[in-house]
Image: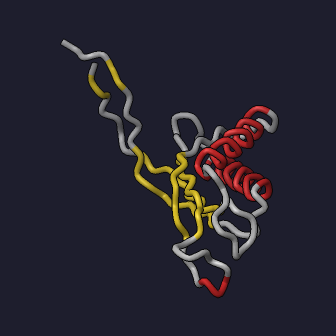
Amino acid sequence: MSWHKGVILKTTQFTLNIGVNAGYGHENQAVDPMKLVAQIWQRHARNQYFNERGPLVAGIVSPAKTVYLESHGCPPGGEDTVLVTGLRNPAFNSDDKSWREAVKAIALAVGKELNQTTAYLSFSEIDFLYLKPSAQEG
């Protein structure tokens, strides 16, 4: 099996940085932040896709530390946060506007469930190469 040499396309990527402990001045009590956010994201993405007939929004969940002033409520050493990243695969979704709206709706639902007052959501244009295994010729 070899990898298919695809064409480079332009698409959109998102990054969400979200906390897992409610409020400020806490001691990072969440036990497994990545698992917690992954489960909540998956549930809301499934709801968005199946119940609201929105685009499919997959994400990659990674641990993070967000550091800000202790006087503003940051725990010593930083606040446990999670990064959720993903991209719009043009092979499955060509409507960038509806995909962005779905990402925003899911992010808001996750934040609400985690009792967050703020989160960072960014979008950027990236080059995308969709690699797929294919049978070797010859």
Q: Residue at x 52, y 74 (%)?
A: 77
Q: How is the image coloured?
A: secondary structure
Taking the view exactly as shown, the residue that stands out farthest to the bottom is: 71
Q: Does 8 appear above or below 78?
A: above
Q: Is residue 51 left or right of residue 26?
A: right
Q: Does 19 appear above or below 127?
A: below
Q: Residue at x 32, y 28 (%)?
A: 4
- The quarter in which the C terminus is drawn is top left
Observer-nearest residue: 59 or 10?
59
* Residue 52, horizontal then vertical, whole percent: 80, 38
Q: Residue at x 52, y 40 (%)?
A: 90
* Residue 21, horizontal then vertical, whole percent: 70, 62
- The number of numbered discs placed on residues in the rendered structure image is 0
* Residue 14, horizontal then vertical, whole percent: 56, 56
The image quarter containing residue 47 is top right
Q: Residue at x 61, y 44 (%)?
A: 35
* Residue 113, horizontal then vertical, whole percent: 79, 53
Taking the view exactly as shown, the residue that stands out farthest to the left is: 138
- The quarter in which the N terminus is drawn is top left
Taking the view exactly as shown, the residue that stands out farthest to the top is: 138
